Amino acid sequence: MNMFDLTGKTAVIIGGNSTLGGSMAEGLGAQGAHVAIVGRNQEKSLAVCAKVEAAGGKAKAFQADAVNPDDLKRVLQEVLDWTGHVDVLMNCPGVNSATPFFELPMEEWDKIMDVNLKSVVLACQIFGKVMMESGRGGSIINISSVSSGPPLSKVFTYSASKGAVNNITQYLAREFAPGGVRVNAIIPGFFPAEQNRQILSAERVESIMRHTPMGRFGNADELQGAAVFLASEKASSFVTGSLLRVDGGFGAMTI
């Protein structure tokens, strides 16, 4: 028995056209899932779809703003029209900032909280309700960050938003368990991506490496195993409310 087979499953990835989201989409598609790539930039989404299909999966791009509930409701219906069900929801929109605390404008705070946190709440409400009512069970995977725990410098709002993602992950794990929907989070370490390149100065890179036992950044494809594990009902049937670290040992150094 293939514990990781996702044949016949539909995975909706909000922010699936990002660096990390796109790689995890490839991993789910390679295991047989139909993958719905949801993002604002349709060109980027179509590029990810091409990679998923090249890896042997099936994918379709859906255009939406992750903080617009009407967009998400429309995408939900479009996905249901496509495959008839939703089995996996992955939430990975993300935006970061290195603005010092005393210079932080509330407009920036609101933007980061909307993208990183509000989008997760909305998607869990809109897609999670259908998953709970379907009788099929399923898996919700939220993408957090190592910044959600220790108070890492220069990313105050980002850290606060990801700490809240951890909290709602564990809250919803309790809320959704009676419906057979598992809710977990992946806590990636430092993976160079669009949202964090602006804050990766030479000094910061040196600091990160000092606190990462494996002594390197992660590669995006190294998140695929965690994503497939949590998406698979066979592999993670009794796993919910967990915060799965994929961080090269960073968490062990900051306890």
Image (cartoon, helix red, strand yellow):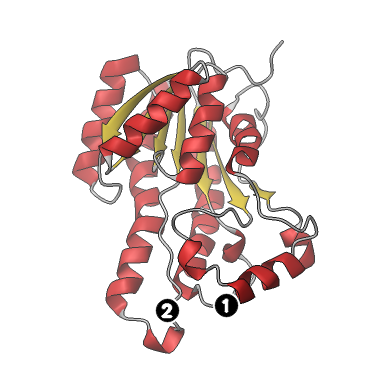
The answer to which of marks 2 and 1 sits earlier in the sequence is 2
> Which kind of residue does numbered mark 1 sit on?
Ser
User: Could you tell me if residue 175 is visible in this image?
Assistant: no
Q: Are marks 2 and 1 in contact (CB under 8 Å)?
A: no
Location of residue 207 (image quadrant): bottom right
Q: Secondary structure at mark 1?
A: loop
Location of residue 69 (image quadrant): top left
* Closer-to-camera residue (193/241): 193
Residue 193 lies, in percent from the top left, at 50, 53
Count of picture labels: 2
* Closer-to-camera residue (253/161): 253
Residue 2 lies, in percent from the top left, at 69, 14
Disc 2 from disc 1: Cα separation: 10 Å
Residue 147 lies, in percent from the top left, at 58, 65
Residue 186 in the figure: left or right of residue 40: right
User: Could you tell me if residue 77 is visible in this image?
Assistant: yes
> Which kind of residue does numbered mark 2 sit on?
Thr
Label 2 neighbour load within 10 Å: few <14, some 14-19, many 20+: some
Q: From the image, which quarter does the N terminus lie in?
A: top right
Label 2 sits on residue? 99
**Can you say whether 252 is above or below 137 in the image?**
below
**Residue that protrudes farthest toward the bottom in the picture:** 102
Residue 80 in the figure: left or right of residue 162: left
Label 1 sits on residue? 153
**Can you say whether 184 is above or below 251 in the image?**
above
Q: From the image, which quarter does the C terminus lie in?
A: bottom right
**Residue that protrudes farthest toward the top in the picture:** 1
Residue at point 56%, 72% (across, down): 201
Residue at point 55%, 56% (across, down): 166
* Closer-to-camera residue (145/177): 145
Residue at point 28%, 42% (across, down): 41
Q: Secondary structure at mark 2?
A: loop
